[in-house]
């Protein structure tokens, strides 16, 4: 990939350095207007399934298993993943999420997946 991937809470102020801002949550974040989000794209289809999201519940002790299960979902979701990979060829992409936990969320797992980590 030609450009970088960043991860940021959707509640943080948009910055020019963010590049293309992509919301990767299935549910719109509470209290955020579309103007404030300043999105290039809301890619719901790349988010974890509702079942996986509910199972994970942002419990750090489930993080490793969540990543494994989410990667399996991503492997079967070629269209949405391809859309993100294509965006990466045109500039930096910042994956936005709404969760409170900055270390254990789907955007962090997705960024690692896209980087091949």
Image (cartoon, rainbow, N blue to C red):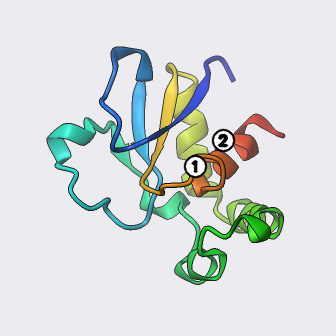
- Residue 12: percent from the left, percent from the top? 35, 36
Residue at image coords 34%, 20%: 15
Please provide percent x and percent y for residue 25: 45, 59
Q: Residue at x 69, y 24 (%)?
A: 1
Mark 2 burial class by Cα count in 10 Å: few <14, some 14-19, many 20+: some
SS at mark 1 in the image: helix
Mark seen at residue 33: none
User: Local crowd at mark 1 within 10 Å, few (<14), some, or many (≥20)?
Assistant: many
- At horizontal 48% and vertical 57% (from top left) the residue drawn is 99
Residue indicated by mark 1 = 107
**Which residue was labeled with disc 2?**
111
Q: Name the element at disc 2.
A: helix
Instruction: Tell me where residue 114 sits by quadrant.
Output: top right
Using the image as rendered, state which of residue 57 and residue 91 is in the foreground. 57
Tell me which residue sits at (56%, 81%) in the image: 54
Residue 34, position as x, y percentages in the image = 19, 47
Lateral position of residue 46 relative to residue 28, left or right = right
């Amino acid at each position: 990939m030609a450009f970088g991937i960043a991860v940021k809470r959707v509640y943080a102020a948009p910055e020019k350095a963010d590049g293309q801002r992509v919301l990767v949550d299935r549910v719109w974040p509470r209290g955020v207007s579309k103007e404030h989000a300043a999105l290039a794209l809301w890619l719901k289809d790349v988010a974890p399934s509702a079942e996986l999201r509910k199972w994970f519940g942002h419990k750090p002790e489930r993080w490793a298993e969540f990543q494994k299960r989410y990667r399996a979902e991503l492997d079967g979701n070629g269209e949405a993943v391809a859309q993100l990979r294509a965006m990466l060829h045109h500039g930096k992409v910042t994956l936005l999420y709404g969760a409170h936990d900055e270390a254990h969320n789907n955007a962090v797992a997705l960024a690692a997946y896209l980087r091949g980590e």
